[in-house]
Amino acid sequence: MDKSRFVELLKGLQTSENAVRQQAETMYQTAKQAEPDNLIIGMMAVLGSADVPEGVRRHDCVLLRQLVTRGAEKDFVYARITDAHKQEVAAELLRQYEQEKLPAIQKKIGEVISKLADYVCDTDDPRASLGAPSGWPALLPQVFRMADTSTATSVESCESALRLLKDCVPTLKDQIVAAKQQLGQIIQNGLASPQVKHKVATFLLVCEIVTETEKKAWAPLLSTVSVLVQAKLLTR
């Protein structure tokens, strides 16, 4: 199925015409069972196409998030595609996330990435891993780089990366807090940013780290940046 047919399928799933929507839903459910690889690769192609209407791409993201979320076998399509396609999907998600120009779509891609990370970075199930050491080797280096307000070229993209980093904390807390110098720099720069949305996203990141880790893990960050003092800027 080429990209145009996937676009039509997604439009059909969104239509208010019952007959058309039911036909599209039948096709979609059949593809999930019979053609998992073609389905995910086709939906990734739609996601990466700027010429596709934003509403269709947004719905595509919602469905992709479901397909990569560990749960019922019939819906968890990612687990049934080939290893080569698993690597391809992961790499393409990161590429599209960084290049996406529409903040709403970038946020949605980030949600897909977060759900996929929950699976491939799960240390209790190393079979899902995309590679050592974290289960998804390319994920944190890219998110760390995009979340640094001192080098970011887009306010919205940097905020999105800070929020994605926060969402990754429950799954990747050990790797995140282990990168003390880089994490401390991100927090320091985020709280010092003139952009309120950066301050808020950074403060939420700090709260997530404190909630998800032991004090001995996050305490060293206090020597890198006076988090509590800096956070008062949010109330001004």
Image (spheres, rainbow, N blue to C red):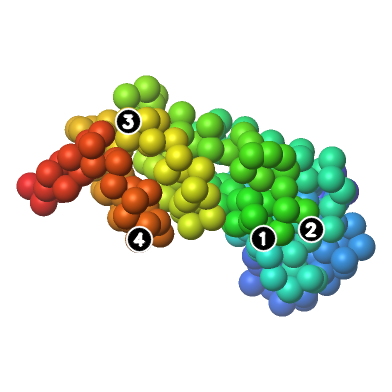
| Chain-order first, disc 2 or disc 1 | 2
Task: Inspect the image, locate mark 3, and give the three-letter code of the amino acid beneath it.
Answer: Gln
Tag on residue 68? none
Tag on residue 124? 1
Q: Nearer the viewer, residue 215 or 119?
A: 215
- State how far apart marks 2 and 1 are (Cα): 16 Å
Tag on residue 79? 2
Which image quadrant for residue 150?
top left
- State how far apart marks 1 and 4 are (Cα): 21 Å
x, y (%) of residue 174? 49, 48
* Residue at (68% x, 51% y) in the render: 120
x, y (%) of residue 45? 73, 41
Q: How many marks?
A: 4
Q: Is residue 214 left or right of residue 200?
A: right
Q: Nearer the viewer, residue 106 or 218?
A: 218
Task: Inspect the image, locate mark 4, and give the three-letter code of the amino acid beneath it.
Answer: Thr
* Residue at (68% x, 65% y) in the render: 70
**Which label sits in the foreground, 2 or 3?**
3
Label 4, on which residue? Answer: 211
Label 2 crowd bin: few (<14), some (14–19), many (20+), radius 10 Å = some
Examine the rendered structure and indicate whether residue 46 appears above or below residue 35.
above
Label 3, on which residue? Answer: 185
| Chain-order first, disc 3 or disc 4 | 3
x, y (%) of residue 95? 62, 33
Examine the rendered structure and indicate whether residue 8 appears above or below residue 94.
below
**Which label sits in the foreground, 3 or 1?**
1
Label 4 crowd bin: few (<14), some (14–19), many (20+), radius 10 Å = few
x, y (%) of residue 219? 29, 47
| Chain-order first, disc 3 or disc 1 | 1
Task: Inspect the image, locate mark 2, and give the three-letter code of the amino acid beneath it.
Answer: Ala
